Every structure is written in structure tokens, then in C-alpha cells.
Amino acid sequence: MPDSVYIISDTHLGAATHEVERTLLEFLRALRGQASTLIINGDLFDFWFEWKTVIPRGAFKTLGALSELKDSGTEIVWVAGNHDCWGGEVLRKDLGVDYRMDAWEGELAGWSVRVEHGDGLREVEDKAYRRLRTVIRNPVSIRLFSWLHPDFATKIATATSHTSRGYRPRDEGMGLRAVAHSTLAADPSLDLLVYAHSHVASLERVGRGVYANAGSWLDAPTYLSVSETAVELHEWKGSLDSAATSSLERIRA
């Protein structure tokens, strides 16, 4: 299979409508035999947690579709977002996903790529959140949360995520875009930098590199595709053959 990479982010299943889930499942099934790699750049679920023998019920259909996609030969990389940062053995062992708590860096279809969810990267606006993230990702906090009954714990988690799951930043993604520009300027070896989190789909040239954001399926079912020659932004319309809404070719060094 030629290198054909697809990137999605911020579907927030559990908070999203049934239509969002339906179109995502349709998209995942279409990738079988077509995608060499699928990258999930965070917040696939609005809430994800793994107890010893329990996982969130609403994840059942999507996990099944991901398992079938993995069995078809597609590699799956999942970069944790701020809503699904409590992944573990279910994702890594049972599903066979390359689940990362931090950014993923490597080569995709010949591109030098960095993929990061983007939460906490804005220097000023995210200062308070970075302190909160330190607490909620602390092993002690995770262990204490695991002692709660899953129904009660899920109710707490979903109640506290109302603001962020419908979130579009006041700056319409400009702060994260500025971080991307400075990152690409500082590392000319990077061909492609992919963020998410802002829910603002983007594809733009920065020097010889490219900044891309797959956007959020809460707004429109957008995704990125990466081939040896170009990175493209698409809107899912029932087929992987639909024309790109925008496209940028790779500039070789």
C-alpha cells in the first residue's frame, strides 16, 4: 500500500450528535484498504478513562471500527488531547494503537512531521490550564479518580466539560497559529506541523514548511490527508475521492 496518511481531531464523541458519530464510523470504514496510517490528534472522545475492567459505554462502536481498521493493516497513532488523556492498556494492548501522551514526531509519506494536540501551548492564555493539566495527569489524581464508581465518575467528567467541548477560542485559533509559525521558523527541518484543539481547520504555508489543523467534526467533518507530494484538507462527503478544499505541495529541501 502506498503511503496514504489521514488525520482527524476533536470529534468529542459522547458530547457530539449521533450524526457526528455516524459520519465518523462511515469515514473509518472507508479507510480500510486505503490508509497506511490514521492519526487521531486528540479528543476523539469527550471523556475517556480506563478502569481495571470498565471503559465508557459510548465508545463501543468507535473502538470496534478502530479495531477492524487496525486489523485491515492500517497503523493508528493516537496523540492524547485534553479530553482523552487517560488512555492506557485498552488502547495500547487490546486495540493495538500507538497511544502517545505527548507529541508524535517522525516521518509520514516522506514528510518530516510533528503532531501535537495543542492544549497548553499558548504562553499567556493557557497558563492557568497548564497548572490544571499537571494536576489531572498526576498519577495520584488518576488513581483517586479510578476509585469512583464509573457512572458517578463519568457524570462528574461530562458535567465539567460543557464549556470546552463546544469551545472555539476567542482568538479563532490565532494564538495556536502564532505558536505554529514560531515553531516552524525555529526548526527548518520540519516539513509539516499539525495541531488540533482550536477546532479551527487550517492549512497554510510557513516558509518551506506547512501548518495544518484538521479542525473539529463538531462543526464540519473535516480531515487531513498526506501523500508524498501534498497535504490536503478535505470535508467528508461520503467518499475519500471528494475534492480537497485546499492543498499544499511538499517543498523538498
Image (cartoon, rainbow, N blue to C red):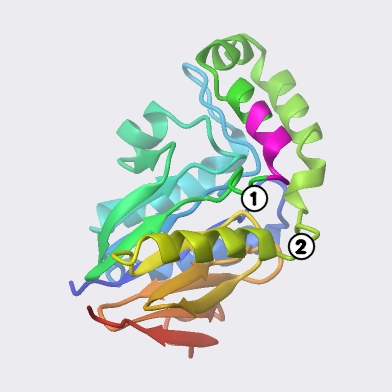
14 horizontally vs 9: left or right: right
Where's residue 107, x and y in %? 24, 61
Q: How many labels does the image show?
A: 2
Residue type, label 2: Asp
Per the image, the residue denoted by label 1 is 12
| Whether residue 67 can be seen here | no
The correct choice, above or below, for 95 with respect to 134 in the image is below
Q: Please tell me whether residue 126 belongs to the stretch shown in magenta.
A: yes
The correct choice, above or below, for 77 with respect to 22 in the image is above
Residue type, label 1: His
Depth order, front residue of 145/127: 127
What residue lies at 53% left-to-right and 23% top-to-bottom? 54
What residue lies at 39% left-to-right and 39% top-to-bottom? 100
The correct choice, above or below, for 81 with respect to 21 in the image is above
**Element class at badge 1:** loop
55 horizontally vs 65: left or right: right
Tell which circle, 2 or 1, labels the residue nearer the N-terminal end.
1
Q: Residue furthest bottom?
A: 243
Dominant secondary structure of the residues highlighted in magenta in the image: helix
What residue lies at 76% left-to-right and 62% top-to-bottom? 171
Depth order, front residue of 185/209: 185
Instruction: Indicate the quadrant where residue 96 lies.
Output: top left
Binning the other alpha carbons within 10 Å of mark 1 as few (below 14), some (14 to 19) or many (20 upward) gives many
For the record, the magenta segment spans 124-131
Per the image, the residue denoted by label 2 is 171
